[in-house]
Structure formats: C-alpha cells, structure tokens
C-alpha cells in the first residue's frame, strides 16, 4: 500500500469530470482545454497508482516505450542500407558479400535485441499487471472498510463500487500500456516524417490532416459509448441480476421447483435486446464513419506510393530509398491509425476510471466529533440513553425511528418488541453507531456517543444481527471472529460453542473444529443448516470480550428447545453486562427487566412484562396472540398441553428481574 493519504488529484477530477459540450464555435478552445485537463488528471491518477504499487513498473514501461520507438526507425534505415548493399552485389561475386556483412549482422542484431527486450518486458508486464491489480483491489477493500454503512444504502455509491471492482483488474494497466505505446508510436512517426520530408513536405502534412477527422470521430463515439453505458447502467444491473438468479446455488432450488427458468431467461433476453439495440446503432455509425475516413487515408497513401515510384524510375532514389520511404509511409499510415484508436481507447478507459476515483472520494461521516476522542471505559456496566432520537435512511424522508427516548441502566436486560418494519434493527444500528441519528442524541455513560473513539466503541459491542455472517472458513475461525484481536484460545472456542449448543453438531463434523465450512474454496467443505449457522453466530457473540451484548433475532432459525437452552446460558453468562435482544418469540421477554415496544418507528410502550400485560396495550395484544397459537397447537396434540399450561401462567403473571 502507498504511504500516507492520496493527494487531492481526485478532487480536481471530481470538479472536472463532467465537461459540458460547447454551445458555439467560440467555446470550442475552452472546451478542448477542459477536456484535456480532465483527461490528463485522470491519467496522472493512474500513474500515481502504478507508482505506489512498484516504481520499477513505470521505469520498465518508459524504457520499453523509448526502445520500441527507436527500433522500427533504426530497422528501416539499416534494412535500406542492407538492400542497397545487396543490389550492388550483382555481378561482383562472393567477394561482395563482405560489403553487406556488417549491415546483415547489424540488422539481425537489432531483431534479436527487439525480441529479447520485448519478451522480458512481457514477463515484467504480467508481473506488474498482477501487482497493480492487487494494489487497487486492496485500495478498494480498505476504502470499503472505512466508509460508513449508510454509503452502501445509496444506489449510486454501490454502483460505483461494483464498477470500480470490475474495472480495477483491467483498465489501469491497459491505460498505462496504451499510453506508453502512444509514446513509442510518436517517436517512430516523427522520425519517419523527417525521413519522408526528403521526398516531399506536403505528404506527411496531408496524411496528418486526413487523420484529424478520424480522431474526432473516434473521440466522439468513445464518449457516446461511455455515456450510453452509464445511461443504461440499470439494464446492466438487471442483466447481472437475472444471470445470477439462474446460477446462484441458493436460488436454483426455487428456480427448478417453480419452473422459473423460462421467466428469468425471457426477462434477460428482453433487457438485452433493448440494451443491445442502442449499442449496435452506435457501433454501426462509428464503423461507417471509419470506413469512409479509411478510404480517404488510403487514397493519400496510394498517391505517395506513386510519387516515390516515379522518383525511383527517374533515378532520383535508389532501391534502398524506395524500401525506406515506402516503409516509412506504411509506418506513418498505420501509426496514425493506431495512435487515434489507442488514444480514443485511453480516453474511454479514463472515463470508466471515474468510477474508481469517485468511489475513493466517498467521505466518511461516522467519526468522533471531538479533536481528541474519548476512550471507552471497558469491562464495566454502561448506561445507555436515547434522547428524542429520529432517523431516516439516506435519500428518503420517512423517519424509521421517530422521536424515541428511553434509558437503560447498567446491567439491565432489554427486549425490543414490534412487528416487522417497526424499527428494531435500525435502533440497534444507531446504538452501535453504524448510523448517526438525523435528530436527537444517543448518550453512553453520560457522553454523546459521537464523542468516543469509533473503533473502541465498536469493540465494546458483542452483536448478532438477524442477517448474521457466514464465513467460508473453519468452525474455529467462525467463532474466533467474535474477538479478533485476541489469540485463538481453543478451550474458550469450545466453551463458547457449548454455551451456544453448537458443540454437539460440531463434534459430528469430519474435522470437528477445524472443518472448513461451505464449498466455495474446499471440495470437502461442509454446508450447515441455517439453524447450525445461527448457533455458530451465537457462539461468536459468547466468545466476544464485549461489555454490551446485542442479539437481533438470535434464535429465529432454532427450535424451541434449542432457543430455551441458549437463553438459559445467555442469562448465566451475561453477568452484569447490559443486554439488548430482539425476538419475535415473546416468551423470551418475560426474563427482561425492560421491554420496549416499537410501532412505525415510535416507542409506544415501555416497562417489564407484568406492567405491560396489565396495560392491555400493544404488547398484551402481541403476547396474547402468540399464547393462543400455542394453546391451539397444544389442543391439536402437537405440544404436551400440561407442559404448556405450566408455562403460560408464569409467562403472563411473573417478571424475572435481572440481577
């Protein structure tokens, strides 16, 4: 990784990356100036990336560009001298061979050097390309680690991230290679133009003049292609989505059983037809322009051939000159064409690099608001207070948390209750400072949560989200991620697994705690059930060295027996830790010292189980519905009715105050 922060090249690019088209002829010079400034700013950004990766990559490219620029000219000149020598040998016998031997050796020495240098360059290019790609991928991952969770909620940011990730492995090194290829071509072309000027001055000028319209057309259509791709980015996302549905192993079961393949294939084909129609039109128009301009260029080249041939016939040039000048002519013609297409390709590539630049410019909002952040006091009880907190997601106006106020004392156990979409998970994300409130303040131990060091704050929470992580690593690593800063302690790993009721199924795995999970990397990887994954996530929380435990639907995929075992362990292990959990099974709420009932983002009820049951409000309604469902199930013989009747009076009339 490159040392230190990146200089503000990206800020310049961000201001310039949208260059408005000129409205009249007077604006053309200014437009071209801004266009080239933007182009070279992007190019400079890529050069910096390569330099940060390995400086030697640039040195190798510069040397090879100069070498490849000189060699064609040198080869053409030596070849002409060799041809003149061979022509002079006619009728002179074998003795004349010595006259051309020097040129012959020199000619093949140049060819050998050319092959050796370019083969070595190819090896170094591949090595450098891998290093540059890896460096950019690391930059993207570092930035993804740094940016706020709210950034991922913005479609434009997520699209830039996907585009940057996709282009990172191709565009930068291609642009660098093409840039130095242009330098080589320019060196060769200028040298050949100087040679041709001995024949006539007007020919090189006409050839270059003829190439100008071709250059303009190429640049115009590269820009149109980029704008079209950006405009139809939704189509490309849809194509990727429909394709992913068809090949994703988690989706393929429903695709097969519900017969959805034809539906998604049909949608894919329909989107592609609409997307390709416009793209094909651009390709055809550009192709027709290029055909016409190529004919014009060939007419000029043909005229030059005629002039040189006449010169030879008149004795003005010898056969070596003919070879040299016609070779120069061909080199200039192909060089101009290559120069135009390569420059246009670089221009198009730098437009796509904007995705990477804009992604890397994403600002981090979640940061301490004090110059010297407060340190979190660890391994003690903590008081949490929400003071008129409201929040809406970026790009929306509806509050998903609306003027919520409450206090949790140190060591309290709190259960968040509410229907789906009530705001429970969002409230947890605010507490853990994955988001900042749009209004109001969250206090931790009397201080604004924004005053604390963010990394220290994150380490204070042991959390399981309902969409918990499933990592394609060993069982041990999946649990150890709960306390990543500590050395892996296998005894503590097993202890956490036992507390989460995960140890029995782990013991049945082929390599027990060293068993690789998922078959993404390992052929013998084990695919766990969703319930087993959830037990591992609970074990991860138990393994964490956290002061505040937060469990968001920690037992949603577990059966009632496993859930009861985990809650018993949970109640024993939490000791004096402040604990918050979300569960739709309200029987778990009876052990909480505080219950918060959310509805449409508002806190509508607060109290313990007994207090809320006596209010006959929303909590009473939700709890009663679940109780009736259990009773109905018991009457149908699916649950032992006597066991249920033993539980229900305790659930509806007793509150267990946490110690």
Image: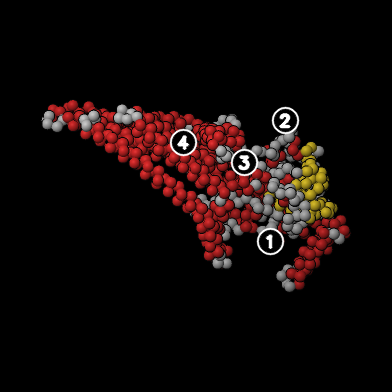
Q: Earlier in the sequence, mark 4 or mark 2?
A: 4
Task: Give the percent coordinates (x, y) of residue 448.
Answer: 78, 38
Residue 352 placement, left or right of 73: right
Distance from label 3 to label 2 (Cα)? 22 Å
Q: Secondary structure at mark 1?
A: loop
Query: Dot 2: within a 10 Å radius of its alpha carbon, few (fewer than 14), some, or many (20 or more) residues?
Result: few
Q: Quadrant of the N terminus?
A: top right
Q: Determine the residue positioned at 37% across, 44% down.
A: 295
The disc label shown at residue 371, or none: 2
Marks 2/1: CA–CA distance: 49 Å
As drawn, 82 above or below 152 = above
Residue 527: percent from left, percent from top: 56, 56
Report the residue that reaches farthest toward the bottom.
636
Instruction: Measure how far apart labels 1 and 3 are at the Cα level.
Output: 35 Å
Tell me where residue 113 sits by quadrant.
top left
Please give the residue where the numbered disc 1 appears in the rendered image.
Answer: 559
Residue 76 in the image: x percent, y percent? Answer: 29, 32
Residue bearing mark 4: 176
Q: Closer to the camera: disc 2 or disc 1? A: 2
Q: Secondary structure at mark 3?
A: helix
Please tell me in which quadrant of the rendered image residue 140 appears. Answer: top right
Q: Determine which residue is flagged by label 3.
A: 145
Q: Are marks 4 and 1 in contact (CB under 8 Å)?
A: no
Task: Give the residue at x 25% y 34%.
Answer: 310
Judge depth for marks 1 and 3 and give the one in front.
3
Q: Is residue 19 left or right of residue 322?
A: right
Depicted 503 relative to depicted 167: above or below: below
């Amino acid at each position: 990784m490159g040392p230190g922060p990146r200089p503000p090249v990206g800020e310049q690019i961000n201001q310039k990356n949208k260059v408005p088209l000129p409205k009249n002829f007077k604006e053309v010079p200014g437009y071209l100036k801004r266009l080239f400034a933007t182009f070279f700013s992007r190019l400079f950004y890529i050069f910096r990336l390569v330099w940060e990766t390995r400086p030697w990559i640039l040195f190798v490219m510069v040397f090879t560009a100069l070498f490849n620029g000189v060699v064609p000219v040198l080869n053409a000149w030596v070849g002409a001298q060799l041809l003149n020598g061979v022509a002079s040998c006619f009728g002179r016998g074998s003795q004349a061979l010595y006259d051309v031997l020097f040129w012959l050796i020199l000619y093949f020495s140049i060819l050998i050097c050319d092959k050796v240098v370019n083969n070595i360059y190819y090896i170094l290019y591949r090595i450098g390309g891998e290093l540059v790609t890896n460096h950019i991928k690391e930059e993207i991952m570092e930035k993804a680690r740094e940016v706020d969770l709210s950034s991922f909620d913005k479609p434009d940011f997520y699209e830039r991230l996907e585009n940057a990730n996709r282009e990172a492995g191709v565009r930068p090194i291609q642009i660098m290679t093409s840039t130095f290829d242009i330098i080589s071509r320019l060196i060769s072309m200028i040298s050949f133009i100087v040679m041709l000027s001995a024949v006539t001055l007007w020919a090189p000028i006409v050839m270059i003049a003829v190439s100008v319209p071709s250059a303009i057309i190429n640049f115009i259509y590269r820009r149109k292609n980029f704008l079209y791709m950006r405009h139809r980015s939704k189509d490309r996302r849809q194509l990727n989505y429909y394709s992913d549905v068809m090949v994703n192993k988690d989706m393929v079961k429903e695709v097969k059983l519900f017969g959805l393949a034809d539906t998604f294939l049909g949608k894919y084909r329909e989107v592609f037809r609409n997307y390709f129609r416009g793209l094909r039109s651009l390709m055809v128009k550009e192709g027709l322009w290029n055909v016409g301009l190529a004919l014009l260029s060939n007419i000029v080249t043909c005229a030059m051939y005629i002039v040189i041939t006449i010169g030879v016939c008149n004795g003005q040039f010898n056969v070596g000159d003919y070879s040299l000048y016609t070779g120069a002519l061909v080199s200039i013609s192909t060089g101009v064409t290559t120069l135009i297409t390569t420059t246009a390709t670089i221009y198009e590539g730098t437009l796509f690099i904007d995705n990477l630049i804009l992604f890397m410019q994403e600002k981090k909002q979640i940061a301490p608001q004090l110059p010297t952040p407060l340190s979190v006091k660890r391994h003690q009880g903590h008081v949490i207070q929400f003071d008129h907190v409201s929040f809406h997601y970026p790009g929306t106006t509806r509050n998903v948390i609306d003027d919520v106020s409450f206090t949790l004392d140190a060591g309290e156990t709190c259960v968040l209750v509410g229907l789906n979409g009530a705001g429970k998970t969002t409230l947890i994300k605010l507490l853990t400072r994955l988001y900042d409130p749009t209004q109001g303040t969250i206090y931790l131990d009397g201080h604004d949560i924004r005053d604390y060091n963010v990394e220290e704050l994150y380490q204070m929470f042991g959390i399981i989200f309902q969409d918990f992580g499933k990592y394609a690593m060993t069982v041990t690593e999946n649990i150890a991620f709960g306390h990543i800063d500590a050395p892996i302690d296998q005894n503590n790993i097993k202890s956490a697994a036992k507390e989460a009721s995960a140890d029995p199924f782990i013991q049945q795995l082929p390599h027990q705690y060293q068993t690789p999970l998922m078959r993404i990397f390992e052929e013998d990887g084990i695919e766990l059930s969703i319930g087993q994954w959830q037990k591992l996530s609970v074990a991860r929380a138990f393994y964490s060295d956290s002061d505040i435990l937060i469990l968001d639907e920690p037992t949603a995929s577990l059966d009632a027996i496993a859930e009861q075992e985990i809650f018993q362990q949970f109640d024993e292990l939490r000791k004096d830790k402040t604990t918050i959990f979300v569960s739709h099974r309200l029987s778990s709420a009876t052990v909480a010292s505080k219950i918060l009932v959310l509805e449409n983002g508002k806190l509508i009820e607060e109290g313990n189980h007994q207090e809320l049951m006596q209010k006959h409000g929303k909590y009473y309604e939700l709890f009663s519905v679940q109780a009736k469902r259990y009773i109905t199930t018991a009457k149908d013989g699916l649950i032992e009715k006597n066991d249920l009747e033993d539980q229900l009076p305790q659930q509806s009339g007793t509150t267990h105050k946490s110690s």
